[in-house]
């Protein structure tokens, strides 16, 4: 019968083989340096737009990992508000806004102490109603249930236990050890390695009834911000973890059923980190594309309705606007009449901003890329 990692005699003294980490860690640092240089070349305005795009992606994907789909426009609204960018006309969702506030707090205030109160506040913000789905949960404090906290799958009666967390009676001691390590390791343990250890350790303790995965990813971002001294992130680990979700859960399960040697987890994390930075290139390219478009059309006199729809098309990307843009969709998005929508779409076609395809009711409009 295997022991979980927290049941090992030497827990929580995690260890690793430094020699096996030198090459992947070197690649991460090289990619990180290139990314910072690329962002520095953007200029202040584009840098803010890049920050917003990354934060939107992080918010959406950290929830998607837990099986929750957020409304993209609500996320954009909250990100814009939190970063001081224009947000008029965008929907507002309190639950989404609370999640964004947690992500922003962890990075922009990474130099503030990590305390139980701060962690409790983050978790309470994720569940403002005190419910996870239809189930009432404890918020603003460590879990205190008598029953074991288990991650399971399979039909009732034949469940497979992937992981079992330490008993709730141990949580005060476990979290005291974790928070002491968090403070003492800052600046004394290699920064990316520290972020990986902090993530694994936290999800292993599993101190909350719900929200542990999201808080662990928030802590990862906070640790990385402490490492590179950047209050904003220009890549998103959550997006990469989402794309590798099966591998992520597999390596977590293997590590948590193993010894306190976590080298294999660290190798995987470093690979994920490197791939996350490479993925950020496409998000930054989207910022360049959007900026180039508005530079090309800076002299065009457009209504606020037209600007709103064009930004929606730019945000969606070449193939992201499902079903294409129609007169009815324009009217719905801008709350105007079909006559007004037709007139404004026709004007955008004449300006060369949109290309009209089809005839009659089948007409759809496509954004013409800036040259």
Image (cartoon, rainbow, N blue to C red):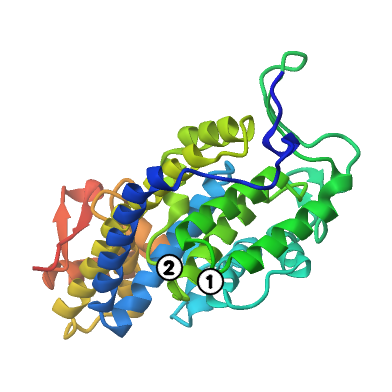
Q: Position of residue 214 (x, y in %)?
A: 61, 53
- Locate residue 227 relative to residue 48 in the image: left or right: right
Q: Is residue 11 above or below residue 108?
A: above
Q: Quadrant of the C terminus?
A: bottom left
Query: Residue 163 falls in which quadrant of the image?
Result: top right
Judge whether residue 326 can be spotted in this image. no
Query: Residue 20 falls in which quadrant of the image?
Result: top left
Q: Is residue 297 above or below residue 72?
A: below
Q: Position of residue 46 (x, y in %)?
A: 29, 77
Say which element carries label 2.
loop
- Locate residue 217 relative to residue 4 in the image: left or right: left
Query: Viewer-proximal residue, 265 or 51?
Result: 265
Q: Is residue 331 above or below residue 156?
A: below
Which residue is under mark 1?
107
Comes first in the chain, label 1 or label 2: 1
Labels 1 and 2 touching (C-beta < 8 A): yes
Say which element carries label 1.
helix
Q: Quadrant of the N terminus?
A: top right
Residue found at the very far left of the displayed protein: 371
Residue found at the very far top of the displayed protein: 158
Query: Viewer-proximal residue, 259 or 54?
Result: 259
Query: Residue 2 falls in which quadrant of the image?
Result: top right
Q: Please tell me which residue is depicted at 65% across the width and 61% down the height of the picture.
A: 95
Q: Is residue 38 above or below residue 128?
A: below
Q: Please tell me which residue is depicted at 78% across the width and 60% down the height of the picture.
A: 176
Q: Position of residue 203 (x, y in %)?
A: 65, 46
Label count reads: 2
Cα gap from disc 1 to disc 2, whole angstroms:
8 Å
Q: Position of residue 142 (x, y in %)?
A: 82, 54
Which residue is under mark 2?
233
């Amino acid at each position: 019968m295997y022991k979980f990692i927290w049941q090992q005699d030497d827990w929580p003294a995690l260890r690793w083989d430094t020699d096996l980490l030198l090459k992947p860690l070197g690649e991460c640092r090289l990619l990180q340096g290139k990314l910072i240089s690329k962002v520095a070349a953007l200029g202040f305005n584009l840098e803010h737009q890049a920050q917003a795009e990354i934060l939107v992606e992080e918010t959406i994907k950290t929830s998607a990992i837990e099986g929750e789909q957020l409304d993209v426009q609500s996320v954009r609204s909250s990100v814009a508000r939190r970063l001081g960018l224009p947000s008029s006309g965008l929907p507002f969702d309190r639950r989404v806004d609370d999640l964004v506030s947690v992500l922003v707090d962890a990075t922009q205030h990474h130099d503030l102490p990590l305390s139980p109160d701060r962690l409790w506040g983050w978790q309470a913000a994720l569940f403002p109603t005190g419910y996870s789905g239809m189930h009432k949960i404890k918020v603003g404090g460590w879990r205190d249930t008598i029953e074991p906290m288990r991650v399971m799958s399979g039909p009732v009666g034949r469940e497979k236990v992937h992981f079992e967390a330490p008993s709730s009676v141990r949580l005060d001691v476990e979290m005291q050890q974790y928070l002491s390590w968090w403070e003492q390791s800052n600046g004394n343990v290699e920064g990316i390695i520290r972020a990986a250890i902090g993530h694994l350790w936290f999800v292993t303790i599993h101190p909350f009834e719900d929200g542990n995965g999201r808080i662990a990813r928030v802590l990862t971002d906070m640790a990385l911000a402490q490492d590179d001294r950047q209050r904003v992130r220009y890549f998103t680990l959550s997006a990469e973890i989402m794309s590798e979700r099966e591998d992520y859960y597999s390596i977590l399960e293997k590590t948590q059923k193993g010894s306190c040697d976590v080298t294999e987890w660290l190798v995987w994390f470093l690979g994920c980190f490197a791939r996350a930075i490479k993925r950020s290139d496409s998000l930054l390219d989207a910022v360049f594309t959007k900026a180039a478009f508005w530079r090309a059309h800076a002299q065009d006199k457009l209504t606020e309705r037209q600007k709103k729809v064009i930004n929606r098309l730019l945000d969606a990307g070449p193939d992201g606007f499902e079903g294409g843009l129609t007169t009815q969709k324009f009217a719905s998005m801008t709350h105007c009449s079909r006559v007004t929508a037709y007139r404004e779409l026709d004007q955008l076609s004449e300006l060369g901003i949109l290309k009209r395809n089809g005839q009659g009711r089948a007409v759809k409009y496509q954004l013409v890329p800036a040259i």
